[in-house]
Image (tube, rainbow, N blue to C red):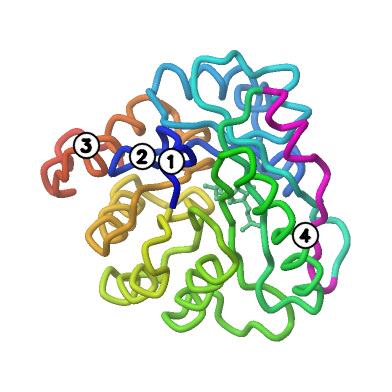
Amino acid sequence: MKGERMEAFLRSGRSLLLAYDQGLEHGPSTDFDERNVDPGFVMDIAVKGGFNGVVFQKGVAERFYTGKVPLIVKLNGKSNIPKGEPLSRQVCSVEYAVSLGAKGVGYTIYLGSAHEPEMFAEFGRIQEEAHERNIPAIAWVYPRGAAVTNDTSKETVAYAARAALELGADAAKIKYTGDSASFSWAVKAAGGVKVFMSGGPKAPTDEAFLRQVKGSMDAGATGLAVGRNVWQHNDPIVMTNHLRQIIFENKPVEALLPSLTV
Ligand code: FBP
């Protein structure tokens, strides 16, 4: 991979990204409260928490991106209102994302959906455009649709990671399998593509979430792309600091237990 595309959030061995596209993906009443419905609140967490990148859709980037943390613009998106086989189409060009200051672009592929070919083709064009501009293309690869029976099985998650490699992604955002040993198969299948664990819904306890993060890092992940487990937290910066200690300092979860709230 050309050095120029290795933006800081991928260049440093490890990386922590803050994702905030759930307003489109899930709707405001599902995920947001009075604090985090405000994109400015999340931009502030990205800065104060020292995140390596923040992920916005273009509309949020236009109004709320302050330039203090590398921007990754999600280029496709969908609401959760239509039912059936998921399809997420491009809503922003690579060129426009770059004009907003993007240092990377993201795209969700629903692997296994009946609409998979459309998303493969669209990501294929995006990946080429991103590489022409020397910025990385990050693939959120989420197995989904009637044909997918278990989206976090070892086999399915490894398939997601491998699809990212085969399709030319610079990084893959994939769901955790539930244990480090099985997740390491996904990391191997990714063939050097940087693997980010996807945060998921807010875990029942901080400890439970930190154990997932630790398990993915032990398996060889590059880092974490997290949303709800940080900006839904009572104290997002405290949670971020815990994550930093696991991701960048290799601390065991046990070392953090005394400072965790249940
Ligand atoms: P979370 O950490 O909140 O799960 O964010 C990661 C993310 O990939 C977001 O970028 C995206 O909006 C969301 O998860 C998709 O969630 P779902 O799995 O419900 O489609």
For this orientation, the residue located farthest to the right is: 82
The residue that appears at 52% across and 35% down in the rendered structure is 232
The residue that appears at 71% across and 51% down in the rendered structure is 126
**Residue depth check, mark 2 versus mark 3: number of the one nearer the observer:** 2
Q: Position of residue 158 (x, y in %)?
A: 45, 76
Contact? badges 2 and 1 (CB < 8 Å): yes
Q: Position of residue 72 (x, y in %)?
A: 59, 35
- Kind of residue at disc 4: Glu
The mark nearer the N terminus, 1 or 3, is: 1
In the image, is the residue at mark 4 within 8 Å of ligand 1 by its beta carbon? no
**Residue depth check, mark 1 versus mark 3: number of the one nearer the observer:** 1
**Residue depth check, mark 3 versus mark 4: number of the one nearer the observer:** 4
The mark nearer the N terminus, 2 or 3, is: 2
Viewer-proximal residue, 66 or 130?
130
| Residue position marked by numbered label 1 in the rendering | 6
Magenta segment:
84-100
To which quarter of the image does residue 103 belong?
top right
| Residue position marked by numbered label 4 in the rendering | 122
| Residue position marked by numbered label 3 in the rendering | 245
| In the rendered image, the vertical position of residue 191 relative to residue 1, given as above or below | below
| In the rendered image, the vertical position of residue 193 relative to residue 155, given as above or below | above
* Label 2 to label 3: alpha-carbon separation: 19 Å
| Residue position marked by numbered label 2 in the rendering | 11
